[in-house]
Amino acid sequence: MSNNKVRYQHWMDAMVDLVATGDDDDQELDRTVRQALEKLEEPEKELAERRYLMGQSIAVISEELRRSERDTERGLREVSLKLKRLLKPYVEKRYNTGIIYQRRCSICEFANRECAEEIIAGKQKKETWRRVMRELRQLGLSIDSPQAVIGHVKYHLSFTRPGKTKTNNNQ
């Protein structure tokens, strides 16, 4: 486990502990974390609340949701990455620091990110990435492989994809 991951996990636990205590002095923190949770899709939100707010173990969550522990761990890892991204501006402002990202995403840093994400979201499930890659290059985004786009979709996509809603449990 890298040092960044350890620091991040302790930071996440501290943020959640403050929210869970219901301390009146920190209403802004409570509101910010709850707003971040509301931006997650329903299955992700449930995982985060069970693990971080209710303190349930992975085994208990897996049993109650009828998932394997491996799937639960994977889901929690994805949720923690999304929460990290959503809470980053608040943490930087409040603690006058930044969260260190191990890799930079060229799509996230792209000036016309919204347009690029619309192209990505327009990909049909059975379609290859060829058309998407061509259109992204025409837009001026220099990406060498679909893996970069797939990683962006998995960890950074800033809006809900067509056909998915926050209450839609189908994945």
Image (cartoon, rainbow, N blue to C red):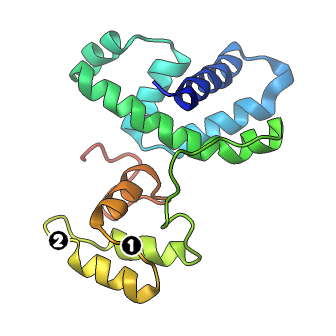
Q: Which residue is mark 1?
A: 143
Between discs 1 and 2, the one toward the N terminus: 2
Residue 80 at x, y percent in the picture: 49, 34
Instruction: Classify mark 2: helix, strand or loop.
Output: loop
Question: Quadrant of the image for the N terminus?
Answer: top left
Instruction: Classify mark 1: helix, strand or loop.
Output: loop
> Crowding near pointer 2: few (<14 within 10 Å), some, many (20+)?
few
Give whichever of 60, 92 is nearer the camera. 92
* Location of residue 57 with respect to 67 vertically, above or below: above
Give whichever of 100, 125 is nearer the camera. 100
Question: Going by the picture, which residue comes out furthest to the right?
Answer: 25
Residue 86 at x, y percent in the picture: 60, 46
- Going by the numbered disc 2, the residue's amino acid type is Thr
> Crowding near pointer 1: few (<14 within 10 Å), some, many (20+)?
some
**Mark 1 or mark 2: which is in front?**
1
Residue 3 at x, y percent in the picture: 56, 26
Identified at 29% across, 42% down, the residue is 169
Snapshot quadrant of residue 16: top right
Q: Which residue is mark 2?
A: 128
* Location of residue 12 with respect to 84 vertically, above or below: above
Left or right: 145, with 28 as reference point: left
Residue 53 at x, y percent in the picture: 55, 19
Label 1 – label 2 distance at C-alpha: 16 Å
Left or right: 91, with 7 as reference point: right
Question: Going by the picture, which residue comes out furthest to the left?
Answer: 126
Question: Going by the picture, which residue comes out furthest to the front?
Answer: 2
Snapshot quadrant of residue 111: bottom right
Give whichever of 2, 85 is nearer the camera. 2
Identified at 44% across, 11% down, the residue is 56
Q: Which mark is residue 155?
A: none
- Going by the numbered disc 1, the residue's amino acid type is Ile
Give whichever of 165, 155 is nearer the camera. 155
